Image (cartoon, rainbow, N blue to C red):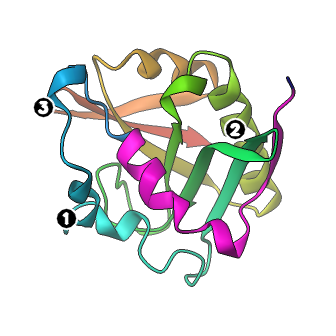
C-alpha cells in the first residue's frame, strides 16, 4: 500500500477541519473534546480561508483514492508562534492510519516543499507527552521554548 503525497485540491480544503481536530492530542480516548472545538478563536485561524493567504501550503497523503492525512502550514500567531516570518506547521492523520510512517513521509515532503519556496524556518507546537513529539527531532526540529508541558519547536530550512 503506497501513499501518494500531493498538494491539496481546492475541493478538499474543508477536510482541514477534520485534520485539525485530529491534530489535537487527546490522550484519553473516552474524554475527547467536542468537534466544535475547531471553531474556537484559538484554533479557527489554522484553517480559516486556507489557501487565500500568501504562503499557505498543504500536502495530503492519499491511499486508494482517500485522503488519510495532511500537513499544512501558514503564518499565524498560533500555539507554535515564534515570529512573524516563521510559518507554523500542523500535521494529522486519520486515527486508523497512524503509526505507519505516513506522518513522517508527509513531514519530509513538506520540509522539502518549504525549502523549494525558500522559507527559512518552520515551527510547530506539540505536547511534550505526545508520542509524536519523538518524531520531530529526527526531522531537524529543536525545542526553542516550553510552555505548560507544550514544546514550541523550530526547524531551520536553510
Q: Which residue is mark 2?
A: 106
Lateral position of residue 46 relative to residue 16, left or right: left
> Mark 3 and mark 2 in contact (Cβ < 8 Å)?
no
Residue visible at 35% across and 70% down in the picture: 45
Q: Percent x, y for residue 152? A: 34, 38
Residue visible at 75% across and 61% down in the picture: 118
Image: magenta residue range: 2-22
Front of the two marks 1 and 2: 1
> Visible in this render: residue 158?
no
Which of 147 and 17 lies nearest the eye of the viewer?
17
> Visible in this render: residue 112?
yes
Measured Cα–Cα span from mark 2 to mark 3: 28 Å
Measured Cα–Cα span from mark 1 to mark 3: 20 Å
In the rendered image, which quarter is residue 63 located in?
top right
Q: Secondary structure at mark 2?
A: helix
Q: Which residue is mark 1?
A: 40
Which of 75 and 93 lies nearest the eye of the viewer?
93
Measured Cα–Cα span from mark 1 to mark 2: 26 Å
In the rendered image, which quarter is residue 150 located in?
top left
Lateral position of residue 114 relative to residue 24, left or right: right
Front of the two marks 1 and 3: 1
Lateral position of residue 44 relative to residue 154, left or right: left
Lower position in the chain sequence, tag 1 or tag 2: 1
Q: Which residue is mark 3?
A: 148
Q: Percent x, y for residue 154? A: 48, 40
Q: Residue 81, relative to residue 137: is it above or below?
A: below
- Residue 141 - label: none
Amino acid at each position: 500500500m503506497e501513499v501518494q503525497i500531493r498538494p491539496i485540491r481546492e475541493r478538499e480544503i474543508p477536510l482541514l477541519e477534520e485534520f485539525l481536530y485530529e491534530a489535537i492530542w487527546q490522550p484519553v480516548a473516552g474524554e475527547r473534546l467536542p468537534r466544535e472545538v475547531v471553531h474556537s478563536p484559538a484554533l479557527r485561524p489554522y484553517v480559516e480561508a486556507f489557501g487565500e493567504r500568501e504562503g499557505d501550503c498543504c500536502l495530503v497523503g492519499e491511499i486508494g483514492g482517500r485522503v488519510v492525512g495532511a500537513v499544512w502550514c501558514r503564518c499565524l500567531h498560533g500555539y507554535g508562534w515564534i515570529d512573524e516570518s516563521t510559518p507554523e506547521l500542523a500535521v494529522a492523520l486519520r486515527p486508523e492510519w497512524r503509526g505507519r510512517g505516513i506522518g513522517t513521509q508527509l513531514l519530509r515532503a513538506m520540509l522539502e516543499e518549504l525549502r523549494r519556496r525558500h522559507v527559512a524556518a518552520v515551527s510547530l507546537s506539540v505536547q511534550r507527552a505526545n508520542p509524536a513529539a519523538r518524531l520531530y527531532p529526527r526531522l531537524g526540529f529543536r525545542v526553542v521554548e516550553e510552555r505548560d508541558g507544550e514544546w514550541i519547536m523550530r526547524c531551520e530550512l536553510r
